[in-house]
Image (tube, grey):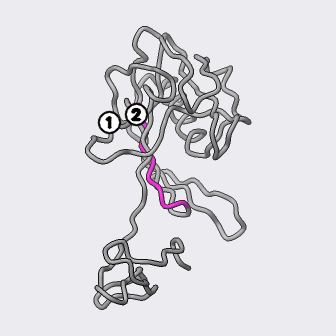
Amino acid sequence: MKENMMKFCSACGEKVNWVMPQGDNRNRYVCVSCGVIHYQNPNVVTGCIPEWQGDILLCRRSIEPRKGLWTLPAGFMENSETNREGAAREAKEEANAEMRDLKLFSMFSIPHVNQIYTIYRGELHQGQASVGEETLEVALVSEDDIPWQALAFPMVVESLKLYFDDRRKGKFETHYGEIVKQDDGELEVTMI
């Protein structure tokens, strides 16, 4: 199955074919004219769990996908930034939130959408946040007030479960997991 429907080479503008280059182990888009191989790699999404006096910050999305549902401030990492810088930038963009002392908390591979998610946890500076361009609403919530049925993404659900489990234990760890879509369409979460 093709990763996307690329039709033309970004180097010379000629047509591309979906073929396995010599010495490779999977199909790629290869230009019929200049021979450039167009590698497509997973996108990195980065974000954070902003903490403030026992509560965490959630954002209600104003954009698709999953508009109107709640999530952690997160988004695609940009070129020329570190993963942690990206998490802090996303908190600023989505919730006008300044983050302090960010530490890697979880990483999930999600192959059916070609994404790697990294989530940090850290202090929400002075507990201050407000609506950003991609957000309808922000809220500091306790564990009991998490809108579990209205969370936007499986990775957010899994990260929050791990977060509250670690908090109850009194020790935060760094977690790695995989969220894999099964043949029946269900998602299987495996922690490694």
Amino acid carrying mark 1 in the image? Arg
Looking at the image, residue 135 lies above or below residue 27: above
Residue positioned 55% across, 45% down in the render: 155
Give the dominant element type of the magenta stretch: helix, strand or loop: strand
Label 2 residue SS: strand
Q: Quadrant of residue 121?
A: top left
The mark nearer the N terminus, 2 or 1, is 1
Amino acid carrying mark 2 in the image? Tyr
The residue where tag 2 is placed is: 120
Closer to the camera in the image, 3 or 33? 33
Q: Badge 2: few (under 14), some or many (20 or more) residues near its Cα, within 10 Å? A: many
The answer to whether the residues at label 2 and label 1 have Cβ atoms under 8 Å apart is: yes
Residue positioned 53% across, 74% down in the render: 5
Q: Is residue 38 magenta?
A: no
If the image is split into quadrants, where does the N terminus sit? bottom right
The residue where tag 1 is placed is: 84
Q: Which residues are magenta?
A: 113-120
Q: Which mark is residue 59?
A: none
Question: Where is residue 39 drawn, in percent x and y?
Answer: 35, 72
Label 1 residue SS: helix
Residue positioned 36% across, 37% down in the render: 86
